[in-house]
Structure formats: C-alpha cells, structure tokens
Image (cartoon, grey):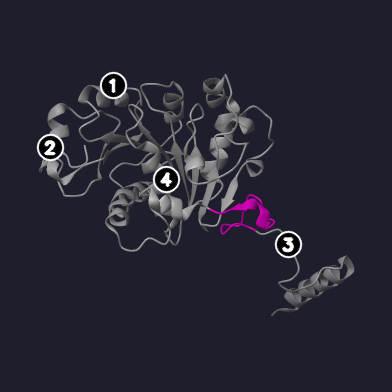
C-alpha cells in the first residue's frame, strides 16, 4: 500500500470513529448494485421481501427455482437462449432495448401470463442475470396475484405521480435474482399513462440502470386492448403466445400487424399436445421461432417449429 493509500485509509477510519460507525459487517452502509449503482431499496428490510407461493406455483404447473431437470425447465431454457443472445447483441439481429421483452397474445386464455412467469423464473436461474417481471396488464392484472404477491401500489401509481420512484413500488422476492413490479391500482386513463413521457422515463430507468437486468412485461392481449400496442413501441423483443388448436391464423397475423417494426418478434407455441403430429416440429409442448418485424405467411407458419 502506498503512502497516499495509507493516508486515505487512516482518514476514513477516523471519520468512521467520529460518526459512531463501525468497520465491520454489523455496520450498515448503502449497498450498491453489482455494477456500482445504488440498488432499489438498498436497505435490507425483511418486511419488504415477499415470499413467492412456490407450492401453489408447482401445483399450477409453473416453473419454480428449485425445479429439477424437468421437461418444462428444459423447454424454457431453449426459449430463453435466443432471447438472451439478442440481449447480449450476439443474435441474428441487433435492436435497441433488447433487454425489454414483452409477452403477449392475440386473445385471452392463450397462456401469456403462464409463459411470462415461466420465462422470468428461468432467467432468474441464470448466474449472471437479474429479472424484473412487470405486471403490465393494467386492466386485468394477474401475474403478481398468481405469484402470491400482495401489493396495492404498482406501475399505474408510479405513472400518475402517486408514487415518486420505482423503489416505492418494486417488490423484492425470496428468489434472489427476481423482482416484481405489480400493475397498481386501476386507472381510467391507463393507455394515456403508458404513452406518457413519464412512462418513457421509467422505461429508460428500468432498461439501463443495470446492465445484467432483463425486464419481462406481461401485457394485455393484442386484439382486445390498446395498451399492448403502446407497450410494444418501447420493447426490443416481443413474444406472442400462440395456443395450439385455439389461436387462428387470422388472429395471429392481425396481432402481429399491431406490433410494428424495428423489433424482434417471437412466436411461442403453447398448449401443444404430442398427438397433434409433426406439423409443429419436436415433441415439446413449447416451441420458439422468431423473425424480425414481420408476420409469417401461412406457408411459413406451417414450416417453422414453434409457430
């Protein structure tokens, strides 16, 4: 240690003694994120950490952090890999905000929330990633409730000014790498809030504050709510969940047409049964194929796994 370094260390110890602080793990100091930024809710408060209802999630067939090498876990490993490659700008296409991923569907009941939760859980299992799951279906929020999260405030309260910062509404969970942003209270001008300048600022903070963070948005169905198209404009990647034997080709194409361009669009096949035959590729219930800013034709849909 140089003379200057010794002097700085001595001054630091003196300052700590004068302030009553102690140079030990028992002393508290604001923690920093792994990239040097102050983390949301830096003070560790056990009361702020909510326990996810893992037993209930398992009973519903959802992925949990303690999942063994199951078929579901393997399938979501396959699904997340190209998404994470795009986040790292190592995929086939390079887009802005690739770490902002929206999960949606054409119509209700096709499994978008199921898929969003499973994807978030799978990414949370990565050693060098953190994931924020946003309950963006502000009209009919279900993601946080399904996880067993009890929180009145959320995204809409942040956008209408009822809350000052992301830290006020962010929910820490007992899954170390996973945070939840609930939808918040119902608001009659939800679409306008999502299209507001404040939303742009919030999105910028969520997407850039931590370089290892992936943000998953569970959005409303494309054909039933205008909010989803507004959200899609801010995303780098969009996953559209397609239910086997349920979602019609016309609904898929109309939903994709509302997503716009300049983003990576993926189709995730849900509710697939092996008895459907080889049309959908492998024996997995979930498939994943992606293109760049365009809807597949009917012939391409029949040929591509996961469509």
Image coordinates for residue 48, horizontal then vertical, percent: 65, 51
Question: Depth-wise, is mark 2 or mark 4 nearer the camera?
Answer: 4
- Residue 237 makes an appearance in the image: no
Q: Residue at x 60, y 44 (%)?
A: 170
Q: Nearer the viewer, residue 195 or 63?
A: 63
**Residue 15 in view here:** yes
Closer to the chain start, of discs 1 and 2, is 1
Disc 3 and disc 4 in contact, CB within 8 angstroms: no
Could you tell me which residue is drawn at 48 percent across and 44 percent down? 133
Q: Which residue is mark 2?
A: 303
Residue 154 left/right relative to 268: right
* Residue placed under numbered mark 3 in the picture: 29
The tag earlier along the polypeptide, 3 or 1, is 3
Q: Nearer the viewer, residue 197 or 175?
A: 175
- The alpha-carbon separation of the residues under discs 1 and 2 comes to 20 Å
Marks 2/3: CA distance? Answer: 57 Å
**Image quadrant in which you'd find residue 198:** top right
Residue sitting at 16 percent across and 46 percent down?
274
Residue bounds of the magenta highlight: 32-51
The quarter of the picture where the C terminus appears is: top left
Of the image marks 3 and 4, the number of the one nearer the N terminus: 3
**Residues under numbered marks 1 and 2 in contact, where contact means CB atoms less than 8 Å apart:** no
Give the overall secondary structure of the magenta segment. loop
Q: CA distance from mark 3 to mark 1?
A: 52 Å
């Amino acid at each position: 240690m140089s003379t200057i370094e010794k002097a700085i260390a001595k001054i630091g110890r003196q300052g700590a003694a004068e302030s009553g602080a102690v140079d030990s793990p028992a002393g508290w100091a604001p923690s920093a994120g792994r990239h040097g930024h102050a983390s949301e809710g830096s003070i560790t408060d056990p009361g702020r950490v909510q326990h996810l209802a893992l037993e209930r999630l398992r009973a519903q067939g959802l992925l949990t952090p303690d999942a063994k090498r199951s078929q579901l876990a393997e399938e979501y490993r396959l699904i997340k890999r190209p998404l994470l490659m795009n986040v790292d700008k190592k995929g086939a296409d390079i887009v802005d905000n690739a770490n902002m991923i929206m999960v949606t569907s054409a119509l209700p009941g096709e499994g978008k929330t199921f898929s969003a939760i499973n994807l978030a859980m799978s990414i949370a299992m990565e050693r060098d990633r953190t994931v924020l799951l946003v309950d963006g279906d502000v009209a009919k929020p279900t993601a946080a409730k399904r996880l067993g999260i009890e929180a009145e405030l959320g995204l809409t309260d942040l956008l209408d000014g009822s809350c000052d910062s992301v830290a006020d509404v962010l929910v820490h969970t007992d899954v170390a790498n996973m945070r939840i942003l609930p939808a918040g209270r119902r608001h009659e001008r939800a679409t306008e809030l999502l299209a507001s300048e404040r939303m742009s600022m919030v999105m910028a903070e969520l997407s850039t504050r931590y370089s290892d963070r992936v943000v998953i948005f569970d959005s409303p169905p494309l054909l039933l709510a205008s909010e989803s198209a507004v959200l899609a404009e801010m995303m780098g990647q969009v996953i559209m969940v397609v239910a086997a034997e349920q979602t019609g080709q016309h609904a898929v194409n109309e939903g994709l047409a509302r997503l716009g361009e300049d983003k990576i669009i993926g189709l995730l096949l849900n509710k697939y049964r092996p008895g459907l035959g080889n049309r959908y590729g492998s024996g997995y219930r979930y498939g994943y194929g992606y293109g760049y800013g365009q809807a597949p034709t009917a012939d391409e849909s029949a040929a591509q796994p996961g469509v």
